[in-house]
Image (spheres, rainbow, N blue to C red):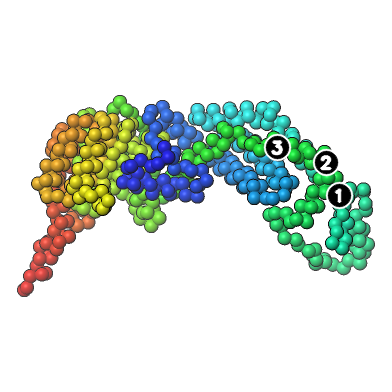
Amino acid sequence: MSEAPAYFADLNLDQIVASITAGKQEYNLAPFFYEALKSREAIEYRQEVMRDLENDAHYDAVTRFANAMRSVREHLGQAGKLHYKYEKQAWLLDAVELYCRCVERLLSDLGAAARSSPGLAGFFTFIEEYVGSSAFQRLLSEIATLKGKLASIRYSLLIGDGVITVSDHHDEPDYGAEIRADFEKFKQGAAGDHIFKFRDFEQMNHIEAGVLDRVALLNPEIFAELDGFSARSSSFFDRTILRFDREVQFYVAYIAHTRRFTDAGLTFCYPRVAAESKEIRVADAYDLALAKILVDRKQPVVTNDFFLNGGERIIIVSGPNQGGKTTFARTFGLLHHLAAIGCPVPATDAQLFLFDRMFTHFEKEEDVHNLRGKLHDDLFRLHKTLEEATSQSIIILNEVFNSTSLKDAIFLSTKILMTIIELDALSVCVTFIDELAALSKTSVSMGSTVKPDNVAERTFKIVRRPPDGLAYAISVAEKYGLTYSRLRERLPS
């Protein structure tokens, strides 16, 4: 899947994925986070790989491998920028050698620690066979032989007035060594270093290229071998190695992200998922996007528990504004999505449902191009959702129909929820309408709470309880300055 699901922005998953993949744009990891897996077996396969890579030895091994492969790509990129034939071939030769060495190192590193996941164990078997293959060993031997021959080349330069003559080296004496020996007898103490330092340019200049061309003419057989090697090695990467190099970054990027939170005392767990049962149970869950902000500010993160037993399908969430209701709804959705892509979820324990599709309905700004009013647009979007949803879907509604009267909101919300009840779909509905909690035995009521001694102060805890509307009424009164104390202040004495 190349595009994010429609619910990504509503659940702030776009922010989470952007944070996870920051600095890894070269791998295009976002699509791995977009597509929910469709079977428990596929999810468990990823979970087992993730567990293996949480091992520091494996994590460090693939990190070293990724860094080395990045260096290989940089060498190839540099070769592509160069103009002179033999310079390009030298960079290619180094790239192929780096590739071979980093694959060998990965095999050694992975072999040093036990592997329990079928994914990592299967890849280890592949790379073991790949490195041991005659083709790979022949490549290594060819590189070593060719580099040895190139290193053995000796030549002499005669630099005249605007002319450089390149010739074979015929064991001419090293006059520099003779001069150093002659002056050694006059040495008094440590001498300063007066050797001129040449700049290390990434590219050859035309004079260096001309010298190299003439060295090649003096050593035609060796440079013919370099030509042949370059032609044969234009595509030296193994496809499985390349695929591993990219896909493993999905795992290590997520693990690196979780460590930011575990270092702050928060927890992740591997959820149990099932498509057969809609009973869910989660302990100490939190919203990753909000948690990142709070952790960065060194502020505490509030966690919540929730469950659905037996025939329970819908969680009706009510309570005062700014009490954590919307965050709770987002957490419910992101937990299910992260579980469906095989990742640990932000909680201490989780049993979740393997959904077919997820639908969210959060407030959106009016679009002047669709020529629909807000209520009309809400109804249009909800109608489309209910047409496409199945009994295996998850539907998250966040304060729908706020733009209409209370009477109409109750009527419309009831119709929507009754349709969801008939579908037997899992749902979370954040609402200011207390009456919705009693629609069916399949729905349960949860509410955001306030401190008993100060109803204006939110705890951000969402708990199972019947709706009472009191905290909401007080918050509304406070918002509009209608509390007893505010009214007394405004009345003349």
In primary-sequence order, the first of circles 1 and 3 is 1
Most foreground residue, 67 or 295 = 67
Splitting the image into 4 quarters, where does residue 161 fall? bottom right
Identity, as a three-letter code, of the amino acid under mark 3 = Ala
Quadrant location of the N terminus in the rendered image: top left
In primary-sequence order, the first of circles 1 and 2 is 1
Image point 46% across, 46% down: which residue? Answer: 21
Identity, as a three-letter code, of the amino acid under mark 1 = Tyr
Image point 13% across, 65% down: which residue? Answer: 486
Total of numbered circles in the picture? 3
Residue 352 at x, y percent in the picture: 32, 34
Contact between labelled residues 3 and 1, with CB atoms less than 8 Å apart = no
Residue 297 at x, y percent in the picture: 38, 57
In primary-sequence order, the first of circles 2 and 3 is 2
Contact between labelled residues 3 and 2, with CB atoms less than 8 Å apart = no
* SS state under label 2: helix
Q: Which residue is mark 2?
A: 220
Q: Residues within 10 Å of mark 1 (few under 14, many from 20)?
A: some
Residue 101 is left or right of residue 354, and the answer is right
Q: Residues within 10 Å of mark 3 (few under 14, many from 20)?
A: few
Residue 298: give its label. Answer: none
Between the C-alphas of marks 1 and 2, the distance is 14 Å
Residue 119 is left or right of residue 202, and the answer is left
Q: Which residue is mark 1?
A: 155
Residue ranking furthest to the bottom? 493
Splitting the image into 4 quarters, where does residue 353 fall? top left
Q: Which residue is mark 3?
A: 231
Residue 472 at x, y percent in the picture: 16, 52
Residue 184 sits above or below residue 138 on the image: below
Between the C-alphas of marks 1 and 3, the distance is 26 Å
Residue 55 sits above or below residue 373 on the image: above
Identity, as a three-letter code, of the amino acid under mark 2 = Pro
